[in-house]
Structure formats: C-alpha cells, structure tokens
Amino acid sequence: MANDVTTGIRWVRNLLGGRMPIEEGVVISNQSGSIFTGDPVKRVSDGTFIVAAGGDTVIYGVCAGVKQYKTAAGVVQGGNYLPTGTTYTGAPNLENPQASIIRIIPTRFQEFEMDMNTAAATLTAAQDLVGNNCDVSVGTGSTTTGRSACVADNSSTGTGTANVRIREVVRTPKNDVTAANWKALVEFVEGNAASPTSATGV
C-alpha cells in the first residue's frame, strides 16, 4: 500500500526527558532559498542560519516555523516558512525588529520521525538499517502549507559522514516499509555542535 506522505522532520521526544526545546535564530538578509517548517538548518560563520543540504555533516536544528520576517510590502509578520530572498535593513541579530527570525529545535539529544525515500524489500531489510546513518534529501517545500519536503535518503546508508541515524522502524499497520515514504525514528549524530567555519556551513 502507499504510505501517507508527511515530509519534513517531525519532533517526537526529548531523549533526556522534558519538553521540546525551542530556540530562535536569525537568517541573513536576502538569503538564498526558502526555509520551510521541518527543514534542517545549519549555522554559518556570521552566526546566522541557512537551510542545510543533502550531504551536510553539520545540522544544528530543525525549523519549527518563522517568528517574523519583513514582506515585500514592508510588513513584519510570522509564518510557517521564510520566502527566499527576504530582505531587511540593520544587523542580523535578534534585537533587530526587522530581522528574519526562525524558531529552531536543536537536534542534540532529540528524537525525530522522518519519511524514508526508498522502499525496503522486506520488514527484515528495513530493520537491518537500524543503527545505520544516512543523508537528508531536502527538496523544495510547499509555499501553500509551509511544510518541508525533506526526507531521509536511506539509499545512502553506510556513508560515514551522514548525519541521520536510524533508531527504529515505526511500528504501525499503516507503515508499509516496502513502499517509499515509510516512517522511521531518527536522531542527528554528526557534528551538530560543530563550529561554523564558513559562509556556507560545513
């Protein structure tokens, strides 16, 4: 059967107990690429955040929505995604009332659910992926819903620098591992607290 497509990274639980952690981060003015709810984000050398890409080894967190951004009409508002090329004047910091600010779930010690983009041959084959790492595949989210198109590229398991570790296959009759977009519980393990050493992330 076909699985429900619920792309984007979805928070499940804090592995240390407690609530979902939320931080705020600034995106540089006139950023390249939209940032959608459920997208992975990384911090770069000027202290701002940008959307992460497939193959990135440093993922700081997951976008949980937009606190504020300045529209083309000059209105500062919130939303569920940050349109590409959003501009503002002044410094890129949280005190700037015009700055583009996103809400972020830091990935450290958190468990998430993700869609796996490649079908497994059997449940046993899917279970064999538990403990392996794979990359994210970000894609372009929906400007209608604001939802990320990010999935886990489980065809890339075995890549040493991959960031997503598969913790568990989601056990429900609606989760068909022999079809694309099956669900797994994951954590982010590679360099999520690393120093941002370049303008594009590392």
Image (spheres, rainbow, N blue to C red):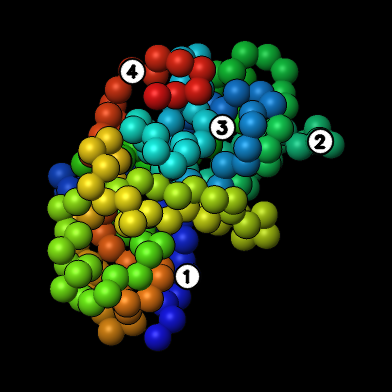
Res. 52 visible in picture = yes
Left or right: residue 196 compared with residue 82: left
Q: CA distance from mark 4 to mark 2?
A: 33 Å
Assign the N terminus to one quadrant of the image. bottom left
Tell me residue 186's x, y (percent): 26, 53
Q: Which residue is mark 3?
A: 101
Q: Which residue is mark 4?
A: 195
Q: CA distance from mark 2 to mark 3?
A: 16 Å
Asked which quadrant contains residue 58, the reply is top left
Tell me residue 150's x, y (percent): 47, 53
Q: Which residue is mark 2?
A: 72
**Residue at 33% in and 18% down:** 195
Residue contact between numbered discs 4 and 1, judged by CB atoms under 8 Å: no
- Residue 5's label in the rendered image is 1
For label 1, the SS is loop
Q: Relative to 102, is 146 above or below?
A: below
Which amino acid is tagged 2? Ala
Q: Nearer the viewer, mark 2 or mark 1?
A: 1
Q: Nearer the viewer, residue 133 or 86?
A: 133
Left or right: residue 67 compared with residue 2: right
